[in-house]
Amino acid sequence: MDSFEFNKIAGWVLAACVLLLGINIVTDGVFKPHPLEKQSFAIAGVEEEVVAGPAVEAEKPIAFYLASASPEKGEAVFKKCAACHNADQGGANGIGPNLYGIVGATHARAAGFGYSDALGGMKGKPWTWDELSAWLKSPKAYAPGNKMSFAGLSKPEERAAVLAWLNTKSASPLPLPAAPAEEAPAAEAAPADAAAPAEAAPAETAPTA
């Protein structure tokens, strides 16, 4: 075998090795194994491992966020709603009703606006701070079947800011609700040694005669 034939065979072998290496890298990226979040079937005697996710802080009442809400920020956030609503005194209804004086008003109160049955059935119910916050959080969840397509404001700080601004768009703004008191942290348990009653001293034995 001359050197030309040897070099040709060596070249093909090298090319095949490079090809296999490339295929291995690609398949590792495409079919990268991932641990299952939950066992696909239970094995007797083996406890299922529970993976704890990040702790989610419970949402406080809207009055807590209103205490520090900024009407200026609320006006900026309200721009998400401006395509359907206006909050000007005497303003016309748009796709949604005019919202001037909405805080403390009643449901379905805008004259001449065609409310859905979901909201029309609530006519006369007060729009309290909590009711407005629930509506802004998720209109679909608050009144299933209503015509509003807006998904809602999930952040309570944004809802509080919008409500603080809407409250200024009124001839008689309402006073902000008092912020709820923070819950005091639970007292730590007293050490077991301190909690245990002291042992009584043994009584002396009377001397015998």
Image (cartoon, helix red, strand yellow):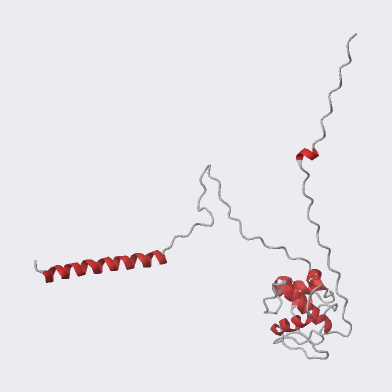
**Which of the 4 image quarters holds residue 99?**
bottom right
Write the residue at 74% across / 73% down: 157
Placement of 39 over or under 68, stated as above or below:
above
**Outermost residue toward the top?**
209
**Outermost residue toward the left?**
1
Q: Nearer the viewer, residue 37 or 84?
A: 37
Residue 108 visible, this orientation: no
- Where residue 6 appears, as percent x and y from the top left, is 14, 67
Name the image quarter holding the N terminus: bottom left
- Where residue 178 appears, as percent x and y from the top left, is 86, 69
- Where residue 57 appears, as percent x and y from the top left, is 70, 63
Placement of 139 over or under 192, stated as above or below:
below
Q: Along the horizontal axis of the image, is 47 left or right of 58?
A: left
**Which of the 4 image quarters holds residue 145?**
bottom right
Write the residue at 72% across / 73% down: 137
Residue 10 visible, this orientation: yes
